[in-house]
Amino acid sequence: MKIANMLVAASLVAFISGCASKDKEVFNMPATYWYEQIAKEIKAQDLEKADGFYTSLASEHIESPLLPEAMMMLANAHMQDEEYVLANFYLDEYLKRYGSRENADHVRFMKIKANYESFPNPNRNQQLLMDTIAQTKEFLSKYPNSKFRPLAETILVRLELGEYFLNENIKNLYTRVDKPEAAKIYEDKITNSSLGKAQMIEPNMPWYRSWFEK
């Protein structure tokens, strides 16, 4: 019995020591430590851990000059991992805290690119498509001399082509289910589109993949 109690006591001591050691590691570390951990986990492709380390960096070192670079690292990493909602989160945070005349066009273009690249995935939706078209037009109007303008123009054309064929598909669907009034709304959109007279080859694959594939 004494041996059993001693073993339990030893286990508790080891557990508490381990927790204390863990707590010491997790809290109150220098900004460079958290930054290095973020970079390490991005390299290891464990973005969940990288996000956790970013939370520690942001909460413990709110004024650290490493924060903006960490945000952009994580935004790019999530884009590469096709996690576009999280990428947009970091880009929005960056714009709110560090956006300036010198970098705003770059960050806003990255947001457009993240939305654009999300369309071949299951979380695509019509509202996001329309919102991204509006954001891209606003970008081109606001930053006419941006070095990202040619890329934004290409994205806009592909988005508008996607919207055109989406409207055709919706119109045909409403026609098949005998909803002429709803079909007329989308027929008018097609008629009034600037792409209406363009010579286009309708994609064999679904619109959301064809026009957004690279």
Image (cartoon, rainbow, N blue to C red):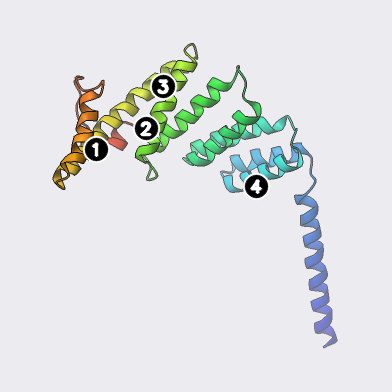
Which tag is nearer the camera, tag 4 or tag 2? 2
Identify the image quadrant of the N terminus.
Answer: bottom right
Cα distance between the residues tagged 2 and 1: 21 Å
Write down the residue under mark 3: 137
The image's mark for residue 52 is: 4
The image's mark for residue 130 is: 2
Mark 1 and mark 4 in contact? Answer it, CB < 8 Å.
Answer: no
In the rendered view, would you say 48 is above or below 32?
Answer: below
Instruction: Tell me the amino acid under the disc marked 3.
Output: Lys
In the rendered view, would you say 142 is above or below 160?
Answer: above
**Near-viewer residue (123 or 187):** 187
Secondary structure of the residue carrying numbered label 4: helix
Secondary structure of the residue carrying numbered label 2: helix
Cα distance between the residues tagged 1 and 3: 27 Å
Seen from this angle, which residue lies furthest bottom? Answer: 1
In the rendered view, would you say 193 is above or below 212?
Answer: above
**Near-viewer residue (103 or 82):** 103
Instruction: Tell me the amino acid under the disc marked 1.
Output: Met
Whichever of labels 1 and 4 marks the residue nearer the N terminus, that label is 4
Whichever of labels 4 and 2 marks the residue nearer the N terminus, that label is 4
Seen from this angle, which residue lies furthest top? Answer: 145
Write down the residue under mark 1: 205
Whichever of labels 1 and 3 marks the residue nearer the N terminus, that label is 3
Which tag is nearer the camera, tag 2 or tag 1? 2
Q: Could one spot residue 46 in this view of the protein?
A: no
Crowding around mark 4 (Cα neighbors within 10 Å: few <14, some 14 to 19, many 20+) is some
